[in-house]
Amino acid sequence: MIKKLPIKWKLTIWSSLLLSVLFISYNLLQYLVMEKWIVSYEQQNMRHQLTEMEAFLKEKSIQTPSQLRRYESYFATINEKNQLLRILDKTGEPILTVSHAVPNDWVKPKNTTSLQYEIVRHGEDRLLILRSPLTIFSGTIEIIRNMEAFDRFRDTIFLVMIATGAGAIILSLLGGTIIAKQLLVNVLAMTNTVQKIKTNGLNERVPINDTNDELAQLGKLFNGLMDDLEQAFSQQKQFVEDASHELRTPLTIIKGHLTMLNRWGKHDPEVLNKSLQSSLKEVDRLIHLVNELLQLSRADIETVEATEAVDVCAVLDSVVRNFSSVYDNYTFQLIRKERVFVSIAVQHLEQIFIILLDNAVKYSRESRKDIHLFVYEENGKVNIVIQDFGIGIPQADLPYVFHRFYRVDKARSRKQGGNGLGLSIAKRLVEKYDGTISIESKEGEGTKVIVTFPVK
Ligand code: ADP
């Protein structure tokens, strides 16, 4: 049942329960100790009186019951309040009785052969009895003390304890509620925020107080998460907008050609041919773009399976061979070639090389069609450098070239079949394998792309 209660009540109930148990056990202990202590105090007191009486009897050298009766007044003076003194003969008959507010018939006279204590009840009253054998003549001394005063005191204490106990439980209930409320105020704020996010969107945040306690930290964490989410969300939106825009351009061109053909190109072989050629080129571009989009999303979601150590130079060699056969007017030189191994899926490493070599080729200038390649190990990292001597990238554009769809010169890049996706695909792939990718470039002089991976 308690499991289903809100945390606020759970906290309150548990804290009050704990406090009550503590309080009750403490009081109980105190009560028992007090009881034991008082009884033993009274016993000592009675023992003391007994010794006094025995000394008196000895001093007066009393030997018979009749001698004893003469000293009744002495016993009356030494008797204490709420106490009965009785001396019995060997048959158990009282020889002498003095009493203060304890009726004689409350306790029956009884002989004893050894010192003993007893507690008996008479109605509401508790009587503490000390019996001791009399040495002068065979008989017994009885001291009977009414514990009424002490019991009244004990009952008062008991009442006080109950009252303070009840007060403490009420206070702890109150305190528990306040503490629970304080604790849960942030949690409630968070719940409200999530509710608002559901209705108003991702821009809501949890208010953070400056206590910096665990809940405030949770709130900050939550806000941080919401920031990331909002950013990812808006990036995603941007991406879809950019992608649609990119897709629209070739589609618009194709539509233009088809409209023209429909109107007056059907019977003009020259127009027909030209339009078909252009449309095919645009379809190729569309296919290329869709492929790149697919690669990008795969690089994002594909999980990396267990990979083997891959010989970087071997992979680079095979990609360069393919490029050389297609671009035979370019020279590809592997300037530094160390045998290094990286843990990566081969097709991913090939894809990275193809993107970077493709850029190097696309953005080289007519005057120098050299591409230099370096593969070496340094500071525990595998470095792969691809350098061209082409048009370079303006300093202002450098920070953005890894963004999706970013192109320095849109017109030129488009002419060369670029969608502005290559570098962002490469970056995602490299980072998947804990690598880094960076670009150094000078406009008009050339570009160096540096990829590093941890050594396998
Ligand atoms: P694209 O498919 O258009 O080449 P990338 O993401 O590969 O897209 O590159 C983004 C932009 O960075 C390119 O449009 C180009 O302007 C610039 N760029 C990339 N590599 C080079 C390079 N080697 N030399 C000069 N500019 C480059």
Image: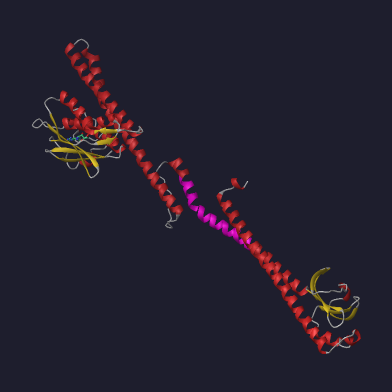
In which quarter of the view is residue 372 placed?
A: top left
Q: Position of residue 399 (x, y in %)?
A: 23, 42
Visible in this render: residue 207? no
Check the image and name the residue furthest to the left.
Answer: 367
Dominant secondary structure of the magenta stretch?
A: helix
Identity of the residue drawn at 26% across and 25% down: 288
Visible in this render: residue 175? yes
Q: Position of residue 273 (x, y in %)?
A: 19, 14
| Count of numbered circles in the view | 0
Q: Position of residue 246 (x, y in %)?
A: 27, 29
**In terms of depth relative to the viewer, which is nearer, 314 or 105?**
314
Identity of the residue drawn at 73% across and 72% down: 39
| Residue 22 sits above or below residue 56 on the image | above
The reply, left or right, for residue 42 in relation to residue 66 is: left
Check the image and name the residue furthest to the bottom.
Answer: 60
Identity of the residue drawn at 23% across and 36% down: 340
In which quarter of the view is residue 249 placed?
A: top left
In which quarter of the view is residue 201 placed?
A: top left
**In terms of depth relative to the viewer, which is nearer, 126 or 392?**
126
Ligand number 1: quarter of image: top left
Identity of the residue drawn at 71% across and 67% down: 158
Q: Which color scheme did the rendering employ for the protein?
A: secondary structure
Residue 42 inside the magenta-drawn segment: no
Residue 172 inside the magenta-drawn segment: yes
Q: Position of residue 377 (x, y in %)?
A: 21, 40
The reply, left or right, for residue 89 in relation to residue 310 is: right
| Residue 135 sits above or below residue 451 on the image | below
Q: Which residues are magenta?
A: 168-193
| Residue 262 sits above or below residue 229 on the image | above
